[in-house]
Amino acid sequence: MKRGFKTEIKKQQEVIKPKVDLSVKRLYVIAFNAYAWFWLIREIFYRQSTNYEDYLLWTFTTLGMYFFVLDNNDIYFKIRKSIQK
């Protein structure tokens, strides 16, 4: 009984883990993009900062996120084409 229960839990984890990982990745990318653009707009229009280091850090982190997205193609939603008969 105990052994069957453990294998059942392992099977459920194998099914759920990829879905949870994908959801977390998507949430991370969306949250990062929202905050990155909010920060840039705030710096340009509201704070009017001229410190180049802040903009340089923004550029590097945004490029890092861009390469993260390129490495993880599973983040994109797959659009299924329906077959019309």
Image (cartoon, rainbow, N blue to C red):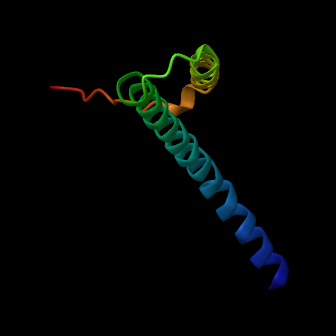
Instruction: Name the residue at 24% across, 27% down.
Output: 83
- Which sits in the foreground, 41 or 81? 41
User: Quadrant of the image for the N terminus?
Assistant: bottom right
In which quadrant of the rendered view does residue 78 lie?
top left
Q: Position of residue 26 (x, y in %)?
A: 51, 40
Q: Position of residue 52 (x, y in %)?
A: 59, 14
- Which sits in the foreground, 27 or 55? 55
Q: Residue furthest left?
A: 85
Q: Across the whole image, how many numbered discs are drawn on residues?
A: 0
Q: Is residue 68 left or right of residue 4?
A: left
Q: Is residue 44 left or right of residue 31?
A: left
Instruction: Name the residue at 52% across, 47% down.
Output: 23
Instruction: Name the residue at 83% across, 83% down.
Output: 2
Query: As displayed, is residue 16 above or below residue 22?
Result: below
Q: Residue furthest right?
A: 3
In which quadrant of the rendered view does residue 74 lie?
top right
Q: Position of residue 71 (x, y in %)?
A: 64, 22
User: Quadrant of the image for the C terminus?
Assistant: top left
- Which sits in the foreground, 3 or 45? 45
Query: As displayed, is residue 5 above or below residue 35?
Result: below
Q: Position of residue 15 (x, y in %)?
A: 62, 55
Instruction: Name the residue at 40% across, 21% down.
Output: 44
Query: As displayed, is residue 20 above or below residue 60?
Result: below
